[in-house]
């Protein structure tokens, strides 16, 4: 058998290159391929439509909110700028909103954020510096962000308590008489 006869070409009549039997085989093959494609699309649709509904996980109450300021404390201020002898600040963190404005002592040139007390791995904090368009964080217990806030006010949000401390030399308190 000549190789061209495998595909139904007889070579005798150029206007009719396939034998009727070969043409029928090709048509059946195309129909089977089409049915297979439609069946596979239908099965994908059924698999998608019948998958079980999984609602999104519930949002934790008090989770991080990058733009919310606590309503009653929106105008509150913890101003420690004139505390010349203070080298630590221990502050509670609010979940779900940023707390009062905080001013660090003017004597502090460098300071560090860290968990205050015995905090578990759920401790975190975020900071929103006055004048910035959005908050930074949240930061976990094992991160120490490099944040320059010298002589600026900021708000904190988080879980637990936070300790801010400075290693700068703080002058001693003036003697009282």
Image (cartoon, rainbow, N blue to C red):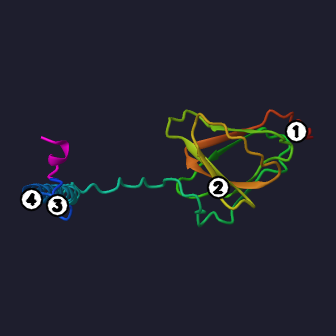
C-alpha span from label 1 to label 3: 113 Å
C-alpha span from label 3 to label 4: 18 Å
Rendered location of residue 138, percent (x, y): 58, 47
Q: Nearer the viewer, mark 1 or mark 4?
A: 4
Q: Relative to 124, does residue 48 appear above or below in the rendering? A: below
The one nearer the camera, 119 or 41, is 41
Q: Nearer the viewer, mark 4 or mark 2?
A: 4
Rendered location of residue 58, percent (x, y): 36, 55
Q: Residue furthest front?
A: 12
C-alpha span from label 1 to label 4: 104 Å
Quarter of the image for the C terminus: give it: top right
Question: Tag 2's secondary structure?
Answer: loop
The answer to whether the residue labelled 1 contacts the one labelled 3, judged by CB atoms less than 8 Å apart, is: no
Q: Nearer the viewer, mark 3 or mark 4?
A: 3
Rendered location of residue 99, percent (x, y): 63, 57
Question: Tag 1's secondary structure?
Answer: loop
- Which of the marked residues, 3 or 4, is nearer the chain's N terminus? 3
Q: Could you say which quadrant of the image residue 89 lies in?
A: top right
The answer to whether the residue labelled 3 contacts the one labelled 2, judged by CB atoms less than 8 Å apart, is: no
Q: Which residue is mark 3?
A: 13
Relative to 53, 81 lies left or right = right
- Which of the marked residues, 3 or 2, is nearer the chain's N terminus? 3
**Dot 2 alpha-carbon crowd within 10 angstroms: few under 14, some 14 to 19, many 20 or more:** some
The one nearer the camera, 24 or 122, is 24
Relative to 42, 170 lies left or right = right
- Which of the marked residues, 2 or 1, is nearer the chain's N terminus? 2
Which range of residues does the magenta coloring cover? Answer: 1-8
Q: Which residue is mark 4?
A: 24
Question: Tag 3's secondary structure?
Answer: loop
Q: Which residue is mark 2?
A: 135
Q: Which residue is mark 1?
A: 173
């Amino acid at each position: 058998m000549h190789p061209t006869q495998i595909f139904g070409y007889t070579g005798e009549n150029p206007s009719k290159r396939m034998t009727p039997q070969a043409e029928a085989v090709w048509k059946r093959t195309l129909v089977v391929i089409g049915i297979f494609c439609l069946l596979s699309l239908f099965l994908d649709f059924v698999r998608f439509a019948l998958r079980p509904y999984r609602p999104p996980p519930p949002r934790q109450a008090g989770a991080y909110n990058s733009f919310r300021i606590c309503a009653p404390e929106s105008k509150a201020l913890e101003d420690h700028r004139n505390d010349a002898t203070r080298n630590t600040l221990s502050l509670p963190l609010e979940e779900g909103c940023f707390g009062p404005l905080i001013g660090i002592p003017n004597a502090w040139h460098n300071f560090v954020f860290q968990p205050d007390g015995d905090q578990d791995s759920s401790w975190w904090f975020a900071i929103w510096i006055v004048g910035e368009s959005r908050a930074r964080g949240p930061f976990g217990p094992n991160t120490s962000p490099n944040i320059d806030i010298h002589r600026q006010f900021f708000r904190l949000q988080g879980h637990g308590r936070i300790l801010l401390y400075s290693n700068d030399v703080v002058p001693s308190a003036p003697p009282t008489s």
